[in-house]
Image (spheres, rainbow, N blue to C red):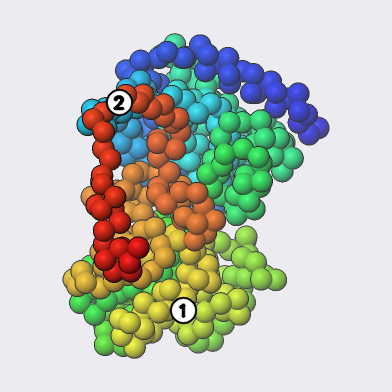
Amino acid sequence: MTNMTPGDISGLMSRARTAMEEFSGATQARLDEAVTAIAWSLYKPETAKALAEQAVEITGLGAVDSKITKNQRKTFGTLRDLMRVKSTGIIEELPEKGLVKYAKPVGVVAAVTPSTNPSATPVNKAMMALKGGNAVVIAPSPLAWSVTNATVEAMRAELAKIGAPEDLVQILPQPVTRDATAQLMGAADLVVVTGSQNNVRRAYSSGKPAIGVGAGNVPVIVDTSADLDDAAEKICASKIFDNSTSCSSENSLIIPDEIYDGAIAALKRAGGYMASPDEGKRIVGLLWRDGKLNRDIIAKDAAVLAGIFKLGGDAASAKFFMVEETGIGGDFPLSGEKLSLVLTIYRAKDFTDAKRIGSEILEHLGKGHSIGIHTQNMENARELAEDIDVVRVLVNQAHTFGNGGGFNNGLPFTLSMGCGTWQGNSITDNLNYTCFLNITHLVTTIPEDKPAEEDLFGGHWEKYGK
């Protein structure tokens, strides 16, 4: 199959712009119909299941049951968020400031999506894009093209059912190459990238406005005041979800001396297996090849890993595997992201030391993304928020389920987490519908709001003189 030509990209863009023109002037109710149609295309049980099965079969990544849950839960949560907000026409009026805000489309969105979420992420981004009246062209992972294509076809079919232009959602045809994706980025009005940091960097170099997200490498502190069994159950549920392919999955636990033995016992009760030092070395030697994660091992089921790692004892029935570590940085691969059911355990002297370890882990990889804490002491949680350079600090939550939005926290549902300038991102938020809007400000005069010089400079003059 030959590579795509600039003319092929031009055709995609032309169809997208025509679809946008046909859909221009859509009322809020009509936009919401389109968003709901997109959501239903994946949420419907038979589709959620079929695409989850296809994803695992094709990519070899993750677990079917988890992907079914992700396909439905993320879509449902995002739909909840989107149905509660306005995204066209007047969206805000501030009479005291003489301002009226009008929302308008950003244009055609190039949405780069990963192999780990080949259905949920394309639908998530399409919902947000169409909420603002935009069109979207999905550039999927080459590995996952067939399942993402099936996802796009499902979205297009639901759009056709409600009489909306199908070309509001399109996909980059095979073969999806680096050049074809770059051409799409250069032709679009906005680029939104979830996936490899190489793709994020290319997006920022595309010459177009770009929103990229950072790598995850989540450290979680189990504080001395934590309910250890509750924390262990949440950590287990989060760690094993989709075989730990989420960027929000716990990668390291940091446990103070005072509760170390009790916390490890609770984690074992929840399904964890503590590797011996020799087993830990074997895990490292197999999980990484030439400094890179071994694709034949990542995202595999626990029983498969227990056999690959040749673990003894009760490892065969374990849900995840713990390896103790003391070092952080490039010479200590366990301090990085693992995309597998391997959880690194650090022993800290106290909370201050735990905070230091968490900060150093994030400085190594994942800065800006998130950190978690299980605690009954909110002062310690607030201290993390004040002192650690992350966008999100999750308290007493299963990190994977809370970081991308939850029904019991206030974060927007998303599959794309911004990490701020700490990781070279332009947003310090979960990707959401506001990222897909242009805002026009209608500005009228108000009574003059001009303070006296004394009001503004008085304190400075008194302290430092004129």
Mark 2, secondary structure of its residue? loop
Is residue 328 in view? yes
**Foreground disc of the pair 1, 2:** 2
Please indicate, yes or no, whether residue 275 appears anywhere in the rendered image.
no
On the image, the x and y values in percent for residue 52 come to 47, 41
The residue located at (64%, 18%) in the rendering is 14
Task: Please give the residue where the numbered disc 1 appears in the rendered image.
Answer: 323
Q: Quadrant of residue 103?
A: top left
State the quadrant of the N terminus: top right
Q: Which residue is mark 2?
A: 445
| Whole-percent x, y for residue 161 in the image | 43, 14
- Which is more toward the observer, 446 or 298? 446
User: For this view, does 267 lie left or right of residue 64?
Assistant: left
Look at label 1 and name its amino acid: Val
Q: Nearer the viewer, residue 215 or 418?
A: 418
Asked if 140 appears above or below 269 in the picture, the reply is: above
Quarter of the image with the C terminus is bottom left
